[in-house]
Amino acid sequence: MYRDDSLERCFNFVRDGMWDWFLTLKYPQTITPKYKWVRYGHPDEAFKVWIDEMTCEHGLTIPYVRVIERRDDGDVLYHVLLRDIPEGFWQRHWRWRWYEFTAGAAWNRRLDAGIERLIKYFFYRLHWDVEYSDYGDATLCEAADDAR
């Protein structure tokens, strides 16, 4: 079992989360020449600013689960569950803001009843780290340590 039951709390949070949105955020190693903004130097920094902007805009702390995929080509992908983000305009807006921060893409994923199984697969089989924040501080569960 994962230290301090953090991982079990994470999976309970995923299961009970009442999620509104599941998306993937890409932080590419190579920037397209069409990109005209100054990019955040690290994907974690960009993610923090992105979540903080959502919090300011929507007036509450945004709960999330973030699976961190580090690819061999240097790209970083975040597979993110979010709550309290309205559909339509706001989701398009936040996908665009990710591009402005990172020169990367953001796209919607299918959100269904199998989401807990998918997050467990990412952690236990693919050994990707999982971070979650339930209206407070974030907790990181590192797959390299305990997902064997």
Image (cartoon, rainbow, N blue to C red):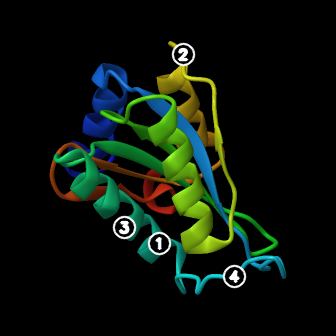
Tell me the crowding category of disc 2: few under 14, some 14 to 19, or many 20 or more residues within 10 angstroms, Cα based: few
The mark nearer the N terminus, 2 or 4, is: 4
Marking on residue 48: 3
CA separation in Å, label 2 and label 3: 26 Å
* Count of number-bearing discs: 4
Disc 3 is placed on an element classified as helix
Marks 3 and 1 in Cβ contact (< 8 Å): yes
Residue 121 is situated, as x and y percent measured from the top left of the image, at 59, 35
- The residue wearing badge 1 is 46
The mark nearer the N terminus, 2 or 3, is: 3
Residue 34 is situated, as x and y percent measured from the top left of the image, at 81, 76
When asked about the image quadrant of residue 23, the answer is top right
Looking at the rendered structure, the kind of residue marked 2 is Asp
- The residue wearing badge 2 is 112
Looking at the rendered structure, the kind of residue marked 3 is Lys
Residue drawn at the location 51% of the way across and 30% of the way down? 88
Disc 2 is placed on an element classified as loop
Residue drawn at the location 18% of the way across and 58% of the way down? 137
Farthest front residue? 89
Residue 147 shows up from this direction? no
Quick check: 125 left or right of 62?
Answer: right
Looking at the rendered structure, the kind of residue marked 1 is Ala
- The residue wearing badge 4 is 36
Marking on residue 35: none
CA separation in Å, label 2 and label 4: 36 Å
- In the image, residue 17 sits, relative to residue 102, either above or below, namely above
